[in-house]
Amino acid sequence: MFLADLVAFALTAFVTLFITIGPVETAAVYLALTAGAHKPERRRLAWRSIAVAGGLLLTFAFLGNPVLHWMHVSLPAFRFAAGAMLFLQAVSLVFASDANMSSISAAEKNEAMKSRDIAVFPLAFPLIAGPGSLTAAVVLMGEASPVHALIVAAALLICLLLTYLAFLFAERLGRLFGMTGADVVGRVSGILLAALAAQFMFDGLRDARLFMPG
C-alpha cells in the first residue's frame, strides 16, 4: 500500500510539473525566439535557460514552505491559491488563440526580441519556471516525508531534462507537430492541468477543514 501511494504521488508530481513546464509548447517558443541564432549559440541559450530555471524551481521547492511558515500562511491556503492560479493557466492554454505564446504577454515577447541574451528572460522565466510550475513545486514539496521530497526533485529534474532535449530537437519537433500539433498539445495539457488545479483546490479545502476547530 505504501509503495502504491509513492507510485501514485510520483506520477502526480511528474504529470503536474510536466504540464506546467510544457516542454513541447516551450520548445515552440524557443524555436521562434532563436530563429536567427547559430546552433552553438542556441545550444548555449538552451543550457543556460534550463540551468537558471532549474535553480529557481529547486529554490522555490525547498525554501517555499519555510517561507510560507515564516509568513504564517498555511499550506492548505497556499494549495488552494495555487490551484486557482493553475486553473487560470489551464484556461489560457485551452482558450488562447495561440497556445504556444500563452505563457508570455505581447510586451514580454517584444522585449525578448530586443534582448541579446534571452536565456534568463523569457526562456528561464516565465516560460520554464513560470508561476504555474513554481507554485506547483511548492505545493508538491509540502509533503513532510523526505521520500516525497526526493520524488519531487527527481520528477523536476526529469522534466527539465526533457525540456532541454525538446530545445535541442526543437526544429524536428516543429516539423513533426507543426503549429497546429503544438496547439493541440497545449490545449490537451490545459485540460489535464485544469483537473489537477481543481484537485489542488479540493485538497486545500479538505485540509483546511481538518485544521478548523470544532
Image (cartoon, rainbow, N blue to C red):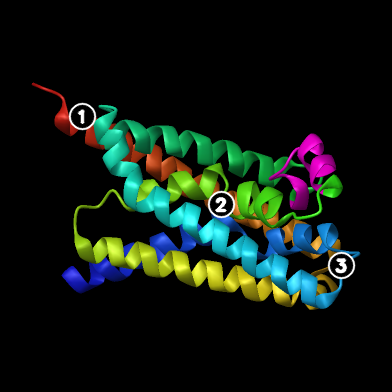
Instruction: State the extent of the magenta-drawn residues as a range.
Output: 100-112
Quarter residue 203 falls in:
top left
The numbered mark, 3 or 2, whose residue comes first in the sequence reads: 3
Determine crowd level at label 3: few under 14, some 14-19, many 20+ residues with C-alpha closer than 10 A: few
- Given the current orientation, which residue lies at the most extreme left position? 214
Binning the other alpha carbons within 10 Å of mark 2 as few (below 14), some (14 to 19) or many (20 upward) gives many
Query: Residue shown at 48%/34% (left/top)?
Result: 84
Q: Residue at x 63, y 64 (%)?
A: 48
Which residue is found at the position 63% from the left and 39% from the top? 91
Which sits in the foreground, 125 or 22? Answer: 125
Q: Is residue 198 left or right of residue 35?
A: left
Label 1 to label 3: alpha-carbon separation: 54 Å
Mark 1 vs mark 2, CA separation in Å: 31 Å
Q: Nearer the viewer, residue 4 or 165?
A: 165
For residue 112, side relative to residue 144 (left or right): right
Residue position for label 1: 209
| Residue drawn at (67%, 46%) of the image | 93
Residue 129: numbered disc = 2
**Residue 1, numbered label:** none
Instruction: Say above or below: 16 vs 138.
Output: below
Q: Are marks 1 and 2 in contact (CB under 8 Å)?
A: no
